[in-house]
Each structure stands twice: as structure tokens, then as C-alpha cells.
Image (cartoon, helix red, strand yellow):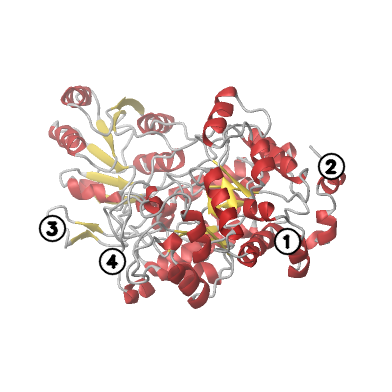
Amino acid sequence: MPSRRTVLAATAGVAASLAIGGTAHADDKKLRSLITRMTLEEKVGQLFVMRVYGHSATAPDQADVDANLKEIGVRTAAEMIARYRVGGIIYFTWAHNTRDPNQIADLSNGIQKASLRQPRGLPVLVSTDQEHGIVCRVGEPATLFPGAMAIGAGGSRKDAHALGRVAGQELRAIGIRQNYSPVADVNVNPANPVIGVRSFGSEAGAVAGLVAAEVAGYQGAGVAATAKHFPGHGDTAVDSHYGFPVITHSRELWEKLDAVPFRAAIRAGIDSIMTAHIQFPALDASGDPATLSHPILTGILRGELGYDGVVVTDSLGMEGVRTKYGDDRVPVLALKAGVDQLLNPPSLDVAWNAVLRAVQGGELTEARLDESILRILRLKARLGLFEKPYVSHGGVTRTVGTPAHLAAADRIAERTTTLLVNEGRLLPLNRNTHPKLLVVGADPASPSGTTGPPTGVLAAALTELGFTATALPTGTAPSAATIAQAVAAAQDADAVIVGTYNITAAQKTLVEQLVATGRPVVAVAIRNPYDVAQLPTVPAYLAAYSWTDVELRAAARVIAGTAAPRGRLPVPVQRADDPAKVLYPVGHGLSYGR
């Protein structure tokens, strides 16, 4: 672990020249002076945030070396930094960046060392998507919280702030200083395939309050929060990873709905805002995605909303931004639109050289690059990266996954579980009258860093609570044979717990046949709460909003009666037979009456 003296030597006096001191703020004059000493190539690199494979900056596994050579043309993170002088690196689980907290801390330190040892070396802004709930890159033993829609069901700004504060402290301890969270999209489309439970809910004001609280928590802990996806991705039926969604909201509706949480984030001092790869004709009729739209990013976000923080694109590898233009044009057009950080292009070499050529050919001015670099350096200075770029194992031990943090996550989760149906007061189950439980249902791939599968987690939690629970995973599309096996197993149980996940016809058949056995059936929606509309015969239904351990354990405690259901729907559930009518409105949620 390098000493502070080593850090200052490695930066060739950069930190000293900035004279940041204990305040971790540098004035623009000093940052502008720093920019004037940068080469054009260094400036171009500073705009990119790139993925890289491997658990180590200098000695990744051979498979990761091979992946880096294939996709980036370098062997390691250190080589990528030396060649392209990237200003940021994003961590992914699938890129093998996030094995465990101490390894992540070492990777972060290795990245900083590799960058700071370069001529005019600058600290790197390390980022990730740690939304909690169904999108997490850093898993156990780090503290994992309920996702946004669960927090929306809890309705507590205090809990949202606590989530941001604790999660921010843990991210900072492992060297991640920019988090692409919270989601500020207002989810008003039950068919939304990409946002859904990643949103706090369907009510703009409620979403805005929770966004602002979470932003304050993260940034109070020294991590840059990122409100996404501007100008609002909450009413799409297309996933922008694979297609090009179109938002048909009027300008007036955008002002009343989509814009509200972003305005709240800006008032809360949000450090960065992420763009959406969506068409929004009422805001820009050109047909360009918002990521490449000057009217949206410069005209509305910068001009009308008065935002002067960092604007980062969503991943440039997503289909939504690649549909209309080639990978060489996208980064140039994004910069012309008003973007500062170019995130994860498919080919760094193509994108980096395209920006370089655009400046050399006069399409982009060097002054335009300087505007974005100044915003990026302001953020790095505000985060204290010039002063303290490194982290320590001691800090990891003191901070990550502590008993106090884990207990806070469990308490918050307990306030989110929502009881939607409870006919004949079936719940809570009594371990004396219903001692033997069968747990069946969907077992989607477990969210990063959780133990899973959900049937196993639920069964283990219920067993700890005094029941004898047996898990029988049936999957998201159970076959007739699997359904028959579950129905046969139910004959030997006192009650059946079944998890539903974006309910399919096969899941519906499974639940209906379990109900037909006459055994008490408790269904748990382990993703979208909208599932309940498809199963009118189920006597008890809970919404857990995710299949992460912390939410499943909370649902188990509610089933057992050791915790009361306190969540309230943050979205309406429409009737299955008539989607124009509401089955359960926002705010619906039953309690255990005395």
C-alpha cells in the first residue's frame, strides 16, 4: 500500500500543485492550469470510462488477458491506461473485477498507481452500477440493500438516505468513487422490460423525494451519485440494450412526470447524470437518441434545468445508441450534444481515435474538450482523489459488510415487504399448525453476490424461523412434468410457498394446480408486483420486489409473523382482464390486524 509520500511523488507534483489540502477542493484556475499542460491525446483519454477484464491491474488471469487483447488490444488495465490515458474505469462482475472487497481494493489501487505513474498522471474515477436490488456488481460480503421499488414501497426518505450513506461508505472503502445510481425514472409502464423494479415507483413526487435522499446519502459518504436515465426511461416497452425505444410523452407530461426526479436530483447537488438511449420526439424531433441530442442535453439539461455537473452516457455498446450511427460517429456526436464522459464503447480504439480525428479535423474544438475535462477534474477534486487516491485493507475491514450495516439492510427490508392479498387471514403462518412447508417457484439467475437460488434462500430462512421447509425449484417456465412433481410434493406439505417472476403461462398453471390441491398457497412476487393480477385464486400474495437475499429473508419473516407487513404499493396494479382498470392502487398494502 503506497504511502502518501509515494502518492505525491507518483503524481509528479500534481497534487501538490493543486494545493487541495484537507478540503479536497481545487479552484478552477488551478484545474485549468493542469489542463493546459495536457497533450491532446491525454485530453481525449480523460473523456472515456472503459471496462477492462481481470481482478488485477497488472496480473489478471490468462483468460482475462485474452479477453482484453481481443476487445481492447491490451493485456491489462495498466496497459490500457498507458495507451489511452482513460479518465475512468467501470467495474463489472462478468469482467471479473469484483471477486471480494480486498481484491477490489487492490485492483483500485493498481489502477490508480498505473495512472499516476504516467507523465502528468491523473487519478482515475472508478465507477460501477451498484443500484441494489436486481442490479449490483459488488456482492457479499458487502452489504446489499433492497432495490428501488422496494424502497418505494417502504416510502421512507430516511431509509433511502441510509442506503446511500452505508452503500457509499462501502464503495469508497474499495476504491469505487462514482456510482451509477439512483434510477430517477418514473416507471409508469408495467410492461417496461428494462426499468421496472429498478424505479422507486410511478408517482413523480414520491420518486423525486427518494432520489434526492439517496443522492444525499451517497455524496455525503464521498461517492458521486448518478441520476439516470435522462430525460426519463420509465415509459418504454423496449429495452434500449437491444432496441431503440420511443417515448411518446408530450412536453407538458414530461415536465409533470419524467423531469420531476431529475430536478430534485439537481437541487440535491447531484454529481453526475446519465443519458438514455431513447427517442423523445416532444423534446427533439430529429429521431436522434437523447444521448446524442444537443436540444435535450445542452438545451434542456444544461440550459433549462441549469445543470453544470458531469453528464455520462449510458453504455455506448447498447443497441439503442448504435441503431442510427456507426461506432465512430457516436462518441463525437455525444460530445457535440453536451456529454462529458463516454462510457464503455464497443471498441475503445475506434471511439478514441474518432474523437482525436474530430478535433484534429476541426469538427470538435479543443476548447470543447476542455469544458468536459474541467467538469471531470472538478469532480475528481471534490471527491478527494488528488489528495487520497488509494484505499487500504484496514479500511475495507472497518467498513464493508459490518454487522451494523447488515442489520440496517435487514431493518430497511422489513419495512418494504407488501401484503397484497390475505384471504381468511391465512398469513402469518403458524409453525405449530403449518410446520411442513414446500417452497417452489421461479429460480432466475441470482443477482450478483447473493447466495440464491430464491427457493433455497426462502426455505433456509423459513427453517431458521422454526418451520421444516423443503425447496423444489420449478423455474420460470416449468414443464408439465415439473408441475406434476410439485403438485405431488404439495400433498405432503402443510402449506406451499411459491415464488413468481414476471409471471408466464407455465408459472400460472403451476400456481393454479397447487391451489387446486386444497393446500394453503402463499405466493411471493420476487420481481414485479404486477404478477398478482394474473392469479386471482391465490389466497395470500406478497410483493418482495426482488429475489436478493435481504428481501427474501424479510418476506420469510413476514410469512412467519416475526415481522409485520409494512410496505405499500408504489405502483398501481392493473386488472389482467381490463388493463384500463386498477386492481390495486398506489398505497395498497394490508396489515396483520390484531
Residue 493 vertical position relative to residue 341 in the rendered view, above or below: above
Residue 300 on image: x %, y %: 46, 73
Residue flagged by tag 1: what amino acid is it?
Ile
Distance, label 3 to label 2, CA atoms, is 66 Å
Q: Amino acid at mark 2?
A: Ser
- Circle 2 SS class: loop
Q: Element type at marker 1? A: helix
Q: Crowdedness of circle 1 by 10 Å Cα count: few (<14), some, many (20+)? A: many
Residue 505 at x, y percent in the picture: 17, 38
Is disc 3 surrounded by few (<14), some (14 to 19) or many (20+) residues within 10 Å?
A: few
Separation of residues labelled 1 and 3 (CA atoms): 60 Å
Instruction: Please give the residue where the numbered disc 4 appears in the rendered image.
Output: 248
Q: Are circles 1 and 4 on residues that touch, CB within 8 Å?
A: no
Amino acid type indicated by mark 3: Asp
Residue at which label 3 appears: 578
Q: Earlier in the sequence, mark 3 or mark 2?
A: 2
Badge 4: residue crowd in 10 Å (few <14, some 14–19, many ≥20)? some
Residue that label 2 marks: 3
Image quadrant occupied by the N terminus: top right
The x and y percentages for residue 221 are 65, 55
Q: Secondary structure at mark 3?
A: loop
